[in-house]
């Protein structure tokens, strides 16, 4: 029986990892994850206990070096699930093992939809070094592709993997469903996605909202201005899965992609963030192209909602 090794960099990586778990439901799962401000033991264990029927083993790690050292546990025939495009040193360390394993890439989602060249220009293209090395970087990406990727898109394939498939529809645990039902009182609310210059309070004031729901990088949800403590992380996509969202408002992020995939008919208002353009390159230009392909409109930045 194949063994599944999952390496998480951030909590929301479980959304794509679920596709592998679903297709290998009888396989033992070994979950390695970085403990940081986006990941913690209780949250990872809770979601993987749910999607594996408590068949997973857990290994918290401190840094990338510990992730690479953990590759020593792999054997021929195993399945390795990891964010290869985000952590190139981890991908190189995997290649050096020279094992007969299947490699599955947890994507950057939106940036990887830009294409091999667009990824560099739109997400990594602020430095002269990147621009000068573009031909070599694209050649490296073309030659060194993980085997499979699961993407929350219906019309776009991931160019960074040999075979790209649509992600499976991820489930929401009964515990989280009941919790979100309880704090919302069964009333659907707009989901506000803040960050990268967009300030939650400014967004709510500008939109004149009295009722809304928002996630946080910390251990809390925000309901109508009230901060609700949580003991397990809940990402924006999980709030969407609860069915307690009437519409979604935010910036050009992966959450918008998942929202369109999970609920094609939900109303989505998405505003460009120039902060990502300044930090990454032509992020807005390539985001707009991706959004058009999946039927989303990217609106110009709204300064009234910024910090």
Image (tube, grey):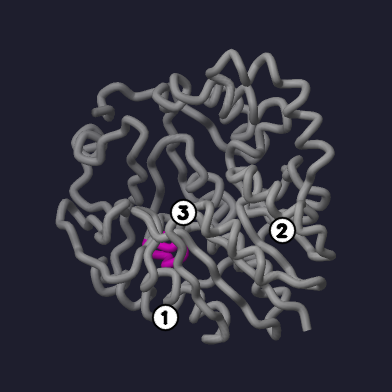
Q: Which residue is mark 2?
A: 104
Residue 238 picture location, percent across and down: 44, 63
Judged by depth in the image, the label closer to the viewer, 2 or 3, is: 3
Residue 26 against residue 124 in the figure, above or below = below
Magenta highlight range: 238-244
Q: Are marks 3 and 1 in contact (CB under 8 Å)?
A: no
Residue with the most extreme left position:
226
Q: Residue at x 33, y 51 (%)?
A: 190
| Identity of the residue drawn at 68% across and 73% down | 4
Q: Tell whether 236 sits left or right of 132.
A: left
Residue 220 coordinates in the image, percent (x, y): 25, 60
Foreground label between 2 and 1: 2
**Residue at (66, 62) in percent of width and height:** 81
Calculate the distance from the C-alpha at mark 2 to the C-alpha at mark 1. 28 Å
Secondary structure at badge 3 equals loop
The residue carrying pointer 1 sits among few (fewer than 14), some (14 to 19) or many (20 or more) residues within 10 Å by Cα, namely: few
Can I make out residue 214 in this image?
no
> Which is more N-terminal, label 1 or label 3?
3
Picture coordinates of residue 282 (x, y %)?
56, 20
Viewer-proximal residue, 285 or 161? 161
SS at mark 2 in the image: strand
Judging from the image, what secondary structure is the residue with disc 1 in? helix
Residue 174's tag is 1
The image position of residue 207, as x and y in percent, is 26, 36
- Which residue is denoted by mark 3 in the rendering? 63
């Amino acid at each position: 029986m194949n063994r599944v090794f999952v390496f998480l960099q951030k909590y929301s990586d479980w959304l794509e990892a679920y596709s592998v778990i679903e297709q290998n439901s009888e396989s033992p799962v070994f979950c390695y994850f970085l403990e940081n401000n986006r990941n913690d033991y209780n949250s990872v264990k809770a979601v993987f206990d749910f999607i594996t029927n408590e068949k997973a083993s857990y290994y918290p790690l401190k840094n990338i070096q510990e992730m690479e050292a953990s590759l020593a546990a792999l054997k021929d025939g195993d399945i390795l699930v990891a964010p290869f495009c985000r952590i190139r040193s981890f991908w190189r360390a995997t290649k050096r093992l020279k094992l007969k394993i299947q490699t599955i890439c947890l994507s950057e989602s939106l940036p990887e939809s830009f294409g091999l060249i667009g990824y560099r220009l739109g997400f990594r293209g602020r430095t002269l070094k990147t621009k000068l090395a573009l031909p070599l970087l694209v050649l490296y990406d073309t030659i060194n592709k993980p085997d499979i990727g699961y993407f929350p898109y219906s019309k776009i394939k991931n160019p960074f993997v040999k075979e790209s498939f649509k992600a499976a529809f991820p489930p929401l645990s009964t515990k989280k469903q009941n919790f979100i039902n309880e704090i919302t009182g069964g009333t659907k609310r707009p989901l506000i996605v803040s960050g990268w210059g967009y300030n939650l309070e400014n967004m709510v004031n500008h939109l004149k909202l009295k009722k809304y729901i928002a996630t946080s990088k910390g251990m809390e949800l925000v309901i109508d201005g009230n901060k609700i403590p949580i003991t397990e992380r809940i990402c924006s996509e999980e709030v969407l899965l609860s069915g307690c969202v009437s519409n979604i408002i935010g910036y050009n992020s992966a959450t918008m992609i998942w929202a369109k995939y999970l609920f094609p008919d939900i109303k989505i208002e998405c505003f460009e963030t120039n902060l990502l353009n300044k930090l990454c390159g032509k992020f807005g230009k390539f985001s707009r192209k991706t959004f058009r392909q999946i039927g989303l409109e990217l609106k110009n930045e709204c300064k009234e909602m910024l910090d």
